[in-house]
Amino acid sequence: MKRLRYYIDTAGGFSPDVDKGNIWIEYPNGESKKYNKWSIISPRVKDGSLIQIGKKPEKEPVDTTEILKEVASILASMAQAVAIMAIAFQS
């Protein structure tokens, strides 16, 4: 019986998009156990067990140009409102 770390290392280690907090071992008897990433000792994996490792959710990239366009629009509207108020109070 080998330990979980052995099987992960044999498979090439973790990929960059893996969720290390979402690792499950499903034993042949149907029992499932979540691996604690803070555990010092890797759990033993019985023959016939299934190891499932979750993937981090994909994040949508931020479009900086779109954000700057919206900020500029808001600032222009605010400047227009201030200008109208300044003219109105001069009268």
Image: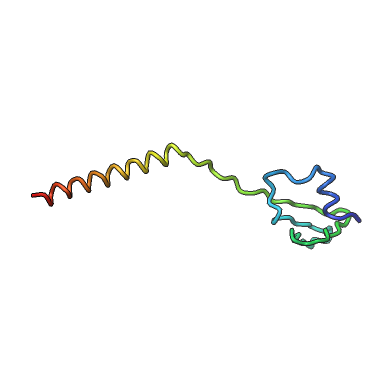
Q: Residue at x 82, y 43 (%)?
A: 11
Q: Residue at x 37, y 43 (%)?
A: 71
Q: Is residue 62 visible?
A: yes
Which color scheme does this rendered protein use? rainbow
In the image, 81: left or right of 13?
Answer: left
Residue ranking furthest to the right: 1
In the image, 28: left or right of 70?
Answer: right
In the image, 28: left or right of 58?
Answer: right
Could you say which is closer to the camera, residue 16 or residue 83?
83
Residue ranking furthest to the left: 91
Q: Position of residue 57 (x, y in %)?
A: 61, 48
Could you say which is closer to the camera, residue 75 or residue 21?
75
The N terminus sits in image quarter: bottom right
Residue ranking furthest to the front: 90
Q: Position of residue 7 (x, y in %)?
A: 84, 49
Q: Position of residue 23 (x, y in %)?
A: 73, 55
Q: Position of residue 73 (x, y in %)?
A: 32, 41
Q: Is residue 34 visible?
A: no
Q: How many marks?
A: 0
Q: Residue at x 84, y 58 (%)?
A: 28
Q: Residue at x 17, y 46 (%)?
A: 84
In the image, 76: left or right of 85?
Answer: right
Please determine whether, in this image, residue 11 is positioned above or below residue 89: above
